[in-house]
Image: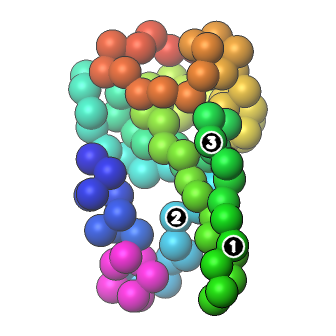
Amino acid sequence: MLQTLMAYNLLLVAGKMGDYPPLYYGHRVPLNLSDSINTMMFTQPSNFPGGFSIKSGRVDLLQVVGITSAELEFAKKASSDELKELIVSNAGGLFTSKDRVSVV
């Protein structure tokens, strides 16, 4: 799954997927992991540092969490950040489980 998302992001950066920006915080990508988890959401990391610096500049790290259809609709109406907070408070952290029930 992560390799697919990384390849998709490389295609975005190279301009091979149209005029879209690279994946970043708050973006949501359809990707079926299971019957209930069908979208991947990109957030600022909550379980590890958000980035680091190297000689050529800053590297921002993204955390990916699988979300349900109901959670996707909630994020569209509210925000990915609000959904992230709901998942953390209800599920105990940002993790992806094929069998996780929706928090909305």
Q: For residue 75, say whether it is visible.
A: no
* Sequence-wise first label, 1 or 3: 3
Range drawn in magenta? 10-16
- Which residue shows up at 55% across the image and 75% down it? 21
Disc 1 vs disc 3: Cβ atoms closer than 8 Å?
Answer: no
Residue 17 locus on image (x, y percent): 36, 79
* Sequence-wise first label, 3 or 2: 2
User: What residue sits right under mark 1 in the picture?
Assistant: 53
Residue 10 locus on image (x, y percent): 37, 76
Q: Nearer the viewer, mark 3 or mark 2?
A: 3
Q: SS class of the residue under badge 3?
A: loop
Q: Which quadrant would residue 66 be assigned to in this image?
A: top left
Q: Which quadrant would residue 5 be assigned to in this image?
A: bottom left
Distance from the alpha carbon under mark 1 to that under mark 3: 15 Å
Task: State left or right for residue 88 relative to residue 18.
Answer: right
Residue 52 locus on image (x, y percent): 67, 65
